[in-house]
Image: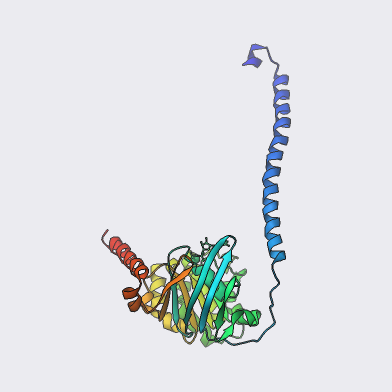
Amino acid sequence: MLVFDGSLSAGAIISCNMLGAKVVSPVKGLITFFADLKTVANAMERVGSVWNSPPERGGLGPQKIITGNFVFKNLTVKLGENYALQDLNGEFDGRQKIAIVGPSGAGKTTLLRVLQGLVRPTNGIVEVDGNNLASLDLNFYRHQVCLIDNQPTFFTGTIEENIRRARPSISSAEFEEILEVSGLSGISRNLPEGLSTQLDVSASALSQSHKLIVAMARGLATSSNLILLDETVNSLDKYSQLHFKNNIDKIVSGKTLILATNDLRFLSEFDYILVMNEGRIESQGKHSQLLKESALYKELFEGEQELSGKIFNL
Ligand SMILES: Nc1ncnc2c1ncn2[C@@H]1O[C@H](COP(=O)(O)OP(=O)(O)O)[C@@H](O)[C@H]1O
Ligand SMILES: [Mg+2]
């Protein structure tokens, strides 16, 4: 308006705009600088904590082939300021299907990470087949453990290459068996490129359920003695959940399978169940026994049934 009135020239308004930009841009830079500074400070804190933590004794200690008989003795894990696990005492035999159940935040994932040898107990010990896990050669131990969680990562290549890379010496009969048992054969028939489908690191071309099935097939190809599944089954689609349920004994076949889950639908299939709450083992036993003895287990199970009932009554 001022320009049209003639009280301000067009040149003056352009200069004004340019000067304004010159003032605003350093202020913006300063704000971004402080935000970046905070990110760098956080990153330095993380690097510092990793740097200052005691080095791992990978490659030292006895190399034991495990069956997966675990005993926890006063197992406590403190993460930051939180006690993720508190004074856990319990045991179960290997070569069977174990479930760890409990509400979110109960400590299930942390316990799996301890069993993987990734998180060290703050107090207490974990014994595997009568040996203190902390005293074993952890590199050798971890080669026998396969964890499948909801964010599997892959290397760039086809589905088939990802699976074969887990065990290059795999025979064609074993490969076919793994495709069947994992459910991948059914899925790959419906993919335009089949097993030749290209994957990136997060397999973004696949649905979440299909990603997990490929991860499962790869996990079976590693011939691990201990398979850890973290909420994996409840993230599968219905068809794959049924396939898992019907094939669970073939998946286990002589291995130890531990499923951490807040989903109690398949638990009657499991041999032994640990019920966790707020970082503690609330009770442990078989499904039918827990239904009678554990108030929390009964509550979780009834909640699951109510949910299914409501869905079917829609
Ligand atoms: N890296 C971490 N730092 C601090 N606290 C953590 C960390 N990871 C998990 N926790 C805490 O430990 C507890 C158990 O977590 P988690 O093992 O993930 O439980 P769940 O798998 O049963 O949901 C929670 O209270 C959670 O907030
Ligand atoms: Mg969890």
Q: In the rendered image, which quarter contains the N terminus?
A: top right
For the residue pair 143 and 89, the one nearer the viewer reads as 89
Camera sees residue 191: no
Res 50 quadrant in image: bottom right
Return the residue nearer the eye: 16 or 145: 145
Up-down relation of residue 214 to residue 207 (above or below): below
- Relative image position of residue 292 (x, y in whole percent): 31, 75
Q: Can residue 209 be seen by looking at this rendering?
A: yes
Residue 109 in the image, given as x and y percentages of width and height? 51, 68
Tell me the colour scheme of the image: rainbow
Q: Residue at the location (69% across, 82% down)? A: 60
Find residue 100 and report its image quarter. Answer: bottom left
Residue at 51% from the left image edge and 81% from the top image edge = 71
- How many marks on residues? 0
Residue 133 in percent (x, y) is at 59, 80
Q: Note whether 145 is above or below 277 in the view shown.
A: below
Q: Is residue 71 above or below residue 44?
A: below
Residue 39 horizontal side relative to residue 239, left or right: right
Q: In the shown orientation, is residue 231 left or right of residue 80?
A: left
For residue 56, what is the image quadrant? bottom right
Q: Position of residue 251 (x, y in %)?
A: 46, 81
Q: Nearer the viewer, residue 170 or 236?
A: 236
The C terminus lies in quadrant: bottom left
- Residue at (58, 64) in percent of width and height: 79
User: In the image as oriented, which residue stretches furthest toward the left?
Assistant: 313
**Left or right of 207 in this view: 25:** right
